[in-house]
Every structure is written in structure tokens, then in C-alpha cells.
Image: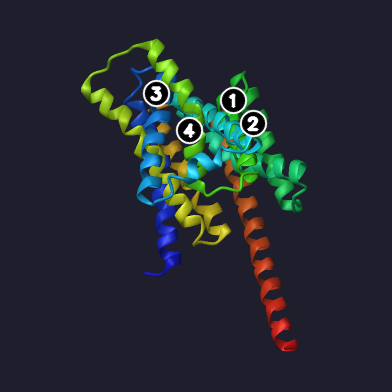
Amino acid sequence: MTDAHRGVLSMVAACTIWGLSPLYYHNLDHVPAAEVLAHRTLWSLAFFAMVLFVQGRIRELPRSVARPRQAGRILAAGLCIGCNWFGFIYAIHNGYALEASLGYYIFPLLAVLLGRFLFAEWLSTLQWFAVALAGVAVVTLTIGLGVPPWIALMLASTFAGYGIFKKRLDLPPVVSVTAEVMLLSPIAITFLALQGHVWTAGTFILLALSGPITAAPLILFSYASRRVRLSTVGIVQYLNPTLQFLCAVMVFAEPFTPWHQIAFAMIWTALALYSVSAFGQERALRRASSSAALSGTARM
């Protein structure tokens, strides 16, 4: 098996874990969402720290937060992902899994839009159309349901914000995520101490599993992203919200109204158009790189 094949399998595994995670958090709906988040933070820290220790890289952790400016960016990234985790857990606990899946469908298009205005990244006409179509989908759902899809917008915006702060961090993925949850851990410890809840052994084990369930897909995703093409990453990652969508409709039996059908059809169309455009751009860049390499060889 080639590195590329292993990368694709790792990407599929990561997105499958993320996509089926609503089933896990649904089993913790008797625990307040904020308390699940606190446990997720601490158990993730324990798991990531163990990974770094086994790799012999644990000394990188204190160095990552030694500079105040970098520590501030790590904390900002941690707050973004913490808010995202809370929003997702809250959505699953309160019957908004369908809206959560919508948020992760919207995220790539929102990230592209933010990249255009914050980093002056170029967008093709087709990509602009895809972003506009996603906006129309959100407006359509707002009109149909009488309220904006706040949870979807919150999940998409916090994850996009997380990506922006991560873009400014020159740290290995596992070190970065470990530092993020480490800086959030005092808040989590204080919150749990104030709650003082004592759960059954079964619930405690489920809460402890939030560590590996959070860490494993991130490590798999990091492994895959270094071995597969960007276009492949972009296409396979839609498996995550698709599985969430199926969990919401087929397992949790959340209502999929005609307004949802129209909005989701628009989002799926927008993502298809964006993916086609992104794939074309990547092929053009590869051709340009190959031509430049051949030209340089010919001049030698």
C-alpha cells in the first residue's frame, strides 16, 4: 500500500469518526453540555500529552507557549475550538443535529470568503457563485423557519475563526492542539470543581472516552493531509457533515422539512461547484509546476 493510499484511508477514518460522533454525544445528553466540554478538554489534554510523551516531544509543549504573542494566538485558537465543541455538544443534546451538520457544510465556503478578505486569496467566478448560493440557502432557511440557523452559523464561524488563528501558528498540529487545551484546562478544572457532580462508572467512562474520540481523528487528519492532494482532502472531508446529516435524519428522526430540503440542496450544489473549481485550480498549479521544472531541466 502506498503512502497516498494510507493517507486516503486515514482521511476517511478521521471523517467517519467525526461524522458518527453525534451517536457518542447523544449518549451523554444527561450530562450538561458545558460539563461534557470540560471533560472533553481535560481528557483531550491527557491523551495528547501522552502522545507527545511517547514521541519524545513533550518538551516542545512549554516552549510553544513561552512567547506571549504566540501564547495569545494559541489561547484565541483554543477559545474558538472550545466554543465550537460546546455548540456541537449543545446541538446534539437539544435536537439540533441537522443544523449542526449544516454548519459544517457551510464552513468551507465561509472559510474561503474569509480567506479572500483577510488574506487576499483569489476566488474564481465559480467560487464566488458557490459562496453566494450558500448565502441564499441560509436566507431561505431563515425565511422558511422564521429564525436564522444560529447554531449552524456559530459552528461555521467558530471553526473558520479557529482556522484563521491556526494559519498564524507555526507549530506542529499535535503540539498546537495540546497547547490549546492546556491553556483552556484551568477553566475546565475550575468549572468541574464548582459543579461537584459525581457520575456513575458508566458515565465516567463515556466522558473519559471524549479524549481519544477527540484526539484520534485529529491525528489521522494530520497524517493524511501530508500524504494526499488538497483536492482529495476537500472532497473526502464532506463525509463528516454527510454522516452527521444521516445521523440527524435517520437515527434521531429530526424533521427534514421542505425548507431544509431546499436549503440543503443549495448548499450541496454550492459545495459541488466549489470542489470542481478548486480541483481545476490545483490541476492548473500542478501543470504550471511541471512546466517550470521541465523548462529548468531544458536550460541545464
Sequence-wise first label, 3 or 1: 3
The disc placed on residue 138 is 2
**Residue contact at pointers 2 and 1, CB within 8 angstroms:** yes
Kind of element beneath mark 1: loop
**Which of 118/99 is in front?**
118
Pick the residue in front: 188 or 252. 188
Q: Quadrant of the C terminus?
A: bottom right
Q: Position of residue 90 (x, y in %)?
A: 46, 22
Disc 1/disc 4 C-alpha distance (Å) = 28 Å
Among numbered discs 3 and 4, the one appearing first in the sequence: 3
Q: Which residue is mark 4?
A: 181
The residue at the point 69 percent across, 34 percent down is 136
Say if residue 118 shows up in the picture: yes
Name the N-terminal-most of marks 2 and 1. Answer: 2
CA–CA distance in space, label 3 to label 1: 23 Å
Tag 3: Cα neighbours inside 10 Å, few (<14), some, or many (≥20)?
A: many
Residue 45's place in the image compared with 240, above or below, is above
Q: Is residue 135 above or below residue 281?
A: above
Disc 2, disc 3: CB below 8 Å? Answer: no
Mark 4 element type:
helix
**Would you name the residue on which mark 3 appears?**
36
Q: Residue at x 49, y 52 (%)?
A: 236
